[in-house]
Image: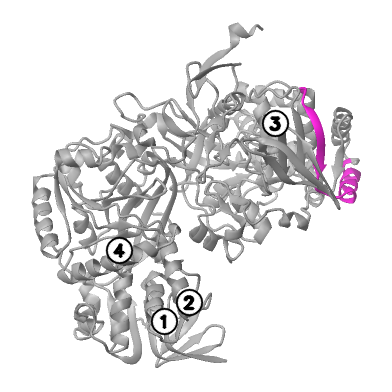
Amino acid sequence: MSSTADVIILGAGIVGAACARACASRGLKTLVVDSGFVGGGATAAGMGHIVAMDDSPAQLTLTRYSQQLWHALAPGLPPEVEFEQCGTLWVAADAEEMEEVRRKCALYESSGIPAEILDAHALAQAEPQLARPLAGALLVPSDAVLYPPSAAAFLMRTAMEAGARLLAPQQVLSAANGRVRLASGEELHAARIVNACGADSVALLPELPIRKRKGHLVITDRYPGFLHHQLVELGYLRSAHAVAADSVAFNVQPRKTGQILIGSSREFGAEDASIHHSLLAAMVARAQQYLPRLADLDAIRVWTGFRAATPDKLPLIGTWPKDDSLFLATGHEGLGITTSLATARLLVALLLNEEPPIPAEPYLPARFLSRSAQENRIFAHAPEQSHA
Amino acid sequence: MKESFDLVVAGAGPAGIAAAVTAAEAGLRVAVVDDNPAPGGQIWRSGAHLPRSAQHWIARLHRSSAVPLLGWRIFDSPEPNLLCAEPSSFPPSSPNGSSLPPHRRHAELRFKKLILATGARERFLPFPGWTLPNVMGAGALDALVRGGLPIAGKRVVVAGTGPLLLAVAAHLARRGAKIVTVCEQASFAQLARFAAHLALEPAKLAQGAGFALALRSARLRTGCWPIAAHGTDRLRAVTLRQGHNFWDVDCDYLACGFHLVPNIELPALLACRIAGGFVSTNGLLETSVPGIYCAGEPTGIGGVELALLEGEIAALAASAQTARAQKVARRRRRKLAFVRALERACTLDPQLRTLPAEDTFICRCEDVPYAALCSRSSWREAKLHTRCGMGPCQGRICGTATEFLFGWNADSVRPPVFPALVANLAVSPARTHDFNGASAASRAGVAAPTHAFKETR
Amino acid sequence: MPESVRSLALTVNGVPIAVQPGTTVAAAVLMAGAPTRISVTGEPRAPLCGMGICFECRVTIDGVPHQRSCQILCRSGMQVRTAPSEPAANPAREFAP
């Protein structure tokens, strides 16, 4: 048995769902295949922070553009997506980090992203639960939060309304040269195949420069009013950058339900989903240093997930030069929720040979092939970057 | 609190008490942990009207050297031979906002051997109106009455399935409740077979006769169950169904439980093998994890007498008294037929799957209606896309219901197995190093909470 | 024994109530005629399981929210608060500095 489409998207996480929606809305006959159900992988494990991130100019461009797409979509999102523009407070603990606040503020403003510097007093007013003294914070009001599985389901539902088809659960055995073989024995054909399998995309393409980066999250019972903004320590980028070592950072989010989501941890080399107790303890202890009264809340659930990490912290979007039929939309590490919509726009432009809405070069998979010999060493030798 | 024991017993119901007493009397250093404020478990809830044998066992526990850790709830096992627990109730934080000191909010219990006597809970099946106040479990109403709720003169409908219904009805009747009716979902034929089995056991026959006496004024209906509860802010009436007959009865309480399901979350967290919903053990009640034993309802719903025997066997085996353990195990084996007979007697009528209406909430924590679940293909999909099971009960109520309604299996158990203080997740005995050094907050001298991790070491 | 000697005095939503020692907070709340909590869609709820499993009996005791009242015994002077009648009422005051 076989079936054909214009484009086959592998993976129905938020990235795959966004790509399906973008493809179907452009009239492409779109087929999505997933081994589980919509939004059941890293999408289900993520925080759902729609955030402008300035790790690199290309990251800021992509996150900012995608965030604007989310804001355009927001009025049409159903309530279960729990979209809320709570803003992010990048919390500075000391004078050194306040310097970083000012640098970041200038950068954001020059990129057209509204930002506001809060001093210690204004920060305490904005978030009375924060420990004192802290030096201040950068408020980025355009940042938002949402519930990722429902967002993915919404994107997939609208994709299907536009004509996309979903095959799930279906295990994919191979995908190459315009042909997708399923464990069921079925074979699918398309001129374009998009690998949007996140951390699992290497299973179909082992040479991809993607590694699993495990994370832990904790969610509490409902405590409405405890927090008002997503809170992230300015040292977060230091943690996100620490490529070799396990790390934790203070990154806490108020859910629309009143629940508090507590992160974050980063860990390479862990393949199983079990709770790493000492890392969890360090992560929670870190959060408590900033929010002492978190201690008294009830945690109701802890889980883990796997980010798809690339060596340069940028996703892989575009053709895979070794196979004309193969496109990638993967490697988003911790920013897949934010950048899913921009990824989909870029991908469709590349599929249809149109002018991309933002420059596509920084995200093209070819950037790794040109220095393919280095690929595996990039991870091992990546220098500890400063967040400047 | 950090303590080490030869044996920790998780649960202070009949199985746990028998285990703790047996092991302590054999000279082991024993702790028995339970989240309730008094020993006895659900079946021997403190209060008056406890059977003499219960009073005897509880007194024996108090006389023994076993350390009772009552009002402590086990929530995790971060490494082998270690359990973490926290108090099941908290005094308020001190006025300056600081939290409880670590030794009062966190216990690390190290053990050489562990006996899991975690008991069982009632199975609840959703029907329209089941979320109304005063609709509750049969065991639940019994427990509330033992906990001081006045019941004299109140009209009570007892419903569901299993021997608990008659026991509860008898107890409530003694306390002056008006038992309007007792509805047993099982058919008359199912019950007759079970009664024939009971006749083989004189002790149980006497119990049955006692119930019958207490229930003279009430009516026991078989093949009968509630299909809706009515009221606005609380229960006012119940619609019952028996075959093709439907009728309403006014009542103050509906005590409705569909037999028992074992509490296997802690055994599952400890990686004990589970088969068919129960903990697998060998003949001396050791689980698939060496040194961890299981006794009472989690090995099979068998009631108090069997639980006492199993507690004793597990304790004898855990204290290396193998010959004695084997002797008691032979007595246990003779009683296992009762477990199977009880299971058959309580087999649920498939028609009970049609009880929920489209808008009946299945998940009470998150208010997820039946209609939202019908199109889902697994428990995990339902959780992620509807929030079913995402509340603080961690799916203990709705997961049991959806297992019957949709045939879903709950996904893997993760710590914490009960909601736990965030502060207690920051305590890790395995923590040996900082992951990325001191945070900027601590470098800047931000006042760390009084319960910072290091103070607990 | 005479109730006046043995009873404990506590308040449920500010209303005094006297109970016998050994009474659970859940029983006291039911005696006071209050639902223990308001569900996320606004329904009144009361205990379901009576054994600390279902979380329907959660109340605020002496300012500490989400306490399972069926497993806690009444103490003299205890202040029990059940869920506000408006689920969206601003509980932020609980967290005021």
Whether residue A98 is situated above or below residue A242 in the rendered picture:
above
Q: Which of the 4 image quadrants contains residue A329?
A: bottom left
Q: Nearer the viewer, residue B260 or A348?
A: A348
**What quarter of the picture does the N terminus of chain B occupy?**
top left
Q: Earlier in the sequence, mark 4 or mark 2?
A: 4
Real-space Cα separation, disc 1 to disc 3, in angstroms = 59 Å
Which region of the structure is painted magenta?
B175-198
Identify the residue under disc 1: A24
Q: Which of the 4 image quadrants contains residue A123?
A: top left
Q: Earlier in the sequence, mark 1 or mark 2?
A: 1
Identify the residue under disc 4: A71
Identify the residue under disc 3: B142
Real-space Cα separation, disc 4 to disc 2, in angstroms = 22 Å
Taking the image as shown, residue C39 lies to the left or right of residue A239, namely: right
- Residue at x-position 52% and y-position 46%: C41
Chain of the residue that carries numbered disc 3 in the rendered image:
B
Taking the image as shown, residue A244 lies to the left or right of residue B306, namely: left
Callouts 4 and 2 close, C-beta under 8 Å: no
Amino acid bearing label 3: Asp
